Amino acid sequence: MDALKKLSVSPHIHSGRSTTRIMLDVLIALLPATVAGVLIFGWRSLLPIAVSVVCCVVFEAIFNLITKKGQTVGDLSAAVTGLLIALNVPANIPLWQCVIGSLFAIIIVKCLFGGLGNNLVNPAVTARVFMLVAFETMTASAFPVDSVASATPLAAETMPSLLTMFLGNHGGAIGETCTAALLLGAIYLLARRVITWHIPAAFIGTVFVFALFMEGFDATSALSFVMAGSLVIGAVFMATDYVTSPSSAWGKIIFGLGAGLLTCLIRYFSIYPEGVSFAILFMNILTPYIDRWTKHKVFATGGKKA
Amino acid sequence: MAFHLRGVHTPHRKNTIKQPTVQMSAPQSVVIPMVMHIGKSAAPTVKVGDLVKVGTKIGEADGKISSNIHSSVSGKVVKLEEYLQPTGEATTAVVIESDGEMTVDPAVCPPTVNSKDELISAIRESGIVGLGGAGFPTHVKLDVDPARIEYLIINGAECEPYVTSDTVTMLTRADDMAYALRQLNKFMGIGNVIIGIENNKKEAIAAMREMAASITECTVNVKSLPSVYPQGGEKVLIYHTTGRKVPAGTLPIDVGCIVLNCTTLAEIGAYLKTGMPLTQKCVTVDGGAVKNPQNVIAPVGTSIADIFNFCGGLVEEPEKIIYGGPMMGVTVPDAKYPVLKNTNAVLALTHKEAKLPKTTACIRCGSCTNTCPFGLAPASIALAYEKKDAEELKALFVDSCMECGCCSFVCPANRPLVQTNKLAKQLLAQEQKKEANK
């Protein structure tokens, strides 16, 4: 035994959790919604998905090469952003729009702010807002499968039945319509402890209660309202992004409440049929403050909050 | 008592408790440093050539916060060498070549104790320090006005993975522990004792309950606690057994509590009974690189290499050798280092066991703050440290950090949060000193 042994500061064991594993779990959780999207909107759904994922990964890889900061695409966060962008666009979206959206999400929102962990706002959400404002075709959708365009439930006169809403057999973005598939994903993420219940419950709960009031206490209408648009996919997969949401339980609840309120205000009182993305973006910006207001009380410091 | 503090579920890996504990014979030589405790180094009282026996004093405590050092073998002092501790501080070590006899010094005899002061003096003589690993001189801890002591809490939690030496104490030295409790009750009036033990040690809990029932002089409660790391952390244990909170910068006695590790208590009992100072330790030897993991009773100063040989040798070259457990233990540069008074385990981790994930960017997941028992925010502390913002570090209560390692353990990016906290504390101390000198 001649060689000196490795010295390092404790702890010397690790739980085994990793960022890559968490991202992989998110990808797995999004699989049901991806499959549902292909079933509902046809094989052409795979094109935006492929383009977005590849573009996000490639753009991040190129940025890392140019800045010589070491390759980070292995942590799968770019792939997750790509998939989320794709699931939030209609199946017949011009593919060049996916390229621009991916560029915006990865280069501008994420890399230029300092890479994973340093972005102020959610790359996928912000890309969606950007695409919504820049390319109006976002508000329409390709349903049924062979038609060019038709209105989504939120934009239409009447809502489809609850079952239709739950199974997602109506117009909308590729991954946002099938509530059943999204719930499967939510259960997986909760079981794997990737997300906690606080943000989805507060977000969706607030929208449900607001809708209940607005729809004259008609629970069916309120439920349809909740399942419409990108609320479920937004509340479960995008609002829960660690980097851009508060860390503490109360912080998450405040985040969810705020996002839910904003979503409803936009949906009911503005020209936009959908408000989820704007709401999440707004709450992302507020998150540093929410974190500051909701820090854990430190043990035995006489009740003083820092 | 309020809810349970946060923590983590570390792997238990307590397989050594299934093996018998074995007494090691005298090694060829021992290296005994003059500081194996918190406080000033002892001053050597022997020189090269002196003949010593087991229990002979070889170092005199220097000042109030210091501890006596005794020889753990019989033989001859061959060297007084400079000894570099793994923490980087230097001290003197006495090297003794053993004659193999382990002859006990005839001066070793039970101390005369008729009062609290004599009890404290006796414990001071014995060289007993906190055997949970910290090594704080026990006579200093106990030298308080007895009226202030409402609870004596005995720490049998042993929450670190691998380590089982305290469990051995609770299973085999209940007599010594009971004797100590009776003496502490007699001379210091300590009437309320709580023994906190993690619930993964059912036999130890039973043994302690049996001991508690036999003590009529004072109330002894055995509390079974959830096996959540860091259950054995002093302030955590106090909170879970009494509901009292110890703020940073204060001591447990300020809330009426004294915490003693169960092995420390047993040593006190043994010393008061026999007069034999702290000269040997029960050490858990474990880790994938060790052929026969087990608990070994070894003389203080035995080299780690000798201990490994006694356990059947090493099956492969370890990547890390650790004093203590893997959550808070200190790494050792090589196996020439000795077993110290406050060593309760030696681990030889294989390359596979020692492998840690790559460190990547913080993703603000909040796992660190959501597992910190004290509710600190290590990710925020790291940011404040990077900016060298001492004001912010103070506002984040970085001095409350007990460096338990929960944060780094759960961090998906494997960020060196404990290391950053240590550095942050240093920075804050430096800045506060500068302010004071202005």
Image (spheres, coloured by chain):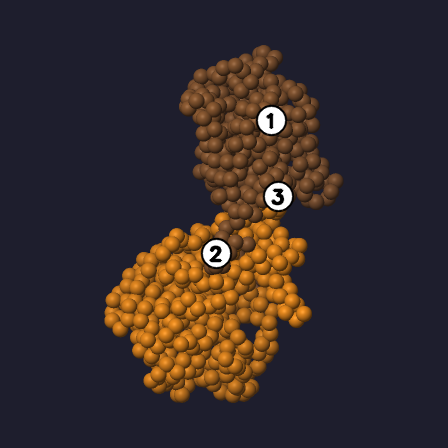
Q: Which mark is residue A86?
A: 1
* Image quarter of the C terminus of chain B: bottom right
Q: Residue at coordinates 49% horizontally, 59% vertically from top-left? A: A301
Q: Which mark is residue A117?
A: 3
Q: CA distance from mark 1 to mark 2?
A: 47 Å
Q: Residue at coordinates 49% horizontally, 87% vertically from top-left? A: B51
Foreground residue among A214 and A241:
A214
Rendering coords of residue B95 (x, y %): 54, 79
Q: Which mark is residue B61?
A: none
Residue B408 position (above or below residue B244): above
Which of the two discs, 2 and 3, sits closer to the camera?
2
Q: CA distance from mark 2 to mark 3?
A: 30 Å
Amino acid carrying mark 2 in the image: Gly
Residue A98 shows in the view: no
| Chain coloured brown | A
| Chain coloured orange | B
Rendering coords of residue A43 (x, y %): 57, 18
Label 3 secondary element: loop
Q: Tell me the chain of label 1.
A: A
Q: Tell me the chain of label 2.
A: A
